[in-house]
Amino acid sequence: MSELTLQLTEAPVKFTNGALNEIKTLMYEKDIPADHGLRIGVEGGGCSGLSYILGFDAKKDGDDEYEIDGVKIYMNRAHGLYLLGMEVDYLNNLNNRGFVFNNPNATATCGCGSSFSA
């Protein structure tokens, strides 16, 4: 009997058009190498227990790879539990400038929005 592997074809994280536009602008301005993509994930720390990771990186062992509107997205498989259903937005107005994480799995967040608990 052969082993069946489930592979997600759709990224567990959504990006708004504003976020995708800012990511593409940063990739161009920073001259990010073609073998790099956007890494999204979590790490221990922050005032609420977990902090978001968002940056450009090469694919690593244990990563799932997705493509959204021409942008390669890398995420460690273990982080999917914390990020499933999350939306990343980008704001650029008088009161806020930067990426915003709207995570339905977060049970508490800090005031700056960059850390959470689940």
Image (cartoon, rainbow, N blue to C red):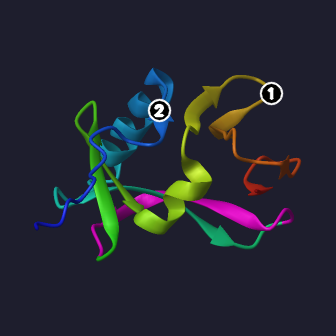
State yes or no: discs 1 and 2 in contact (Cβ < 8 Å).
Answer: no
How many residues crowd mark 2 within 10 Å: few (<14), some (14–19), many (20+)?
A: some
- Say which residue appears at 17% left-offset and 61% top-offset: 35
Tell me the SS state at disc 2: strand
x then y, percent, for residue 65: 28, 54
Q: Tell whether position 55 is magenta.
A: yes
- Say which residue appears at 52% left-offset and 62% top-offset: 79
Mark 1–mark 2 distance (CA, rounded to whole Å): 21 Å
x then y, percent, for residue 117: 79, 58
Considering every residue shown, the one lying at the far front of the view is: 1
Residue 116, placed above or below residue 20: below
Q: Report the residue marked by disc 1.
A: 95
Magenta residues (range) = 47-60
Q: At label 1, which amino acid type do we have?
A: Asn
107 relative to 72 in the view: left or right: right
Residue 99, placed above or below residue 31: above
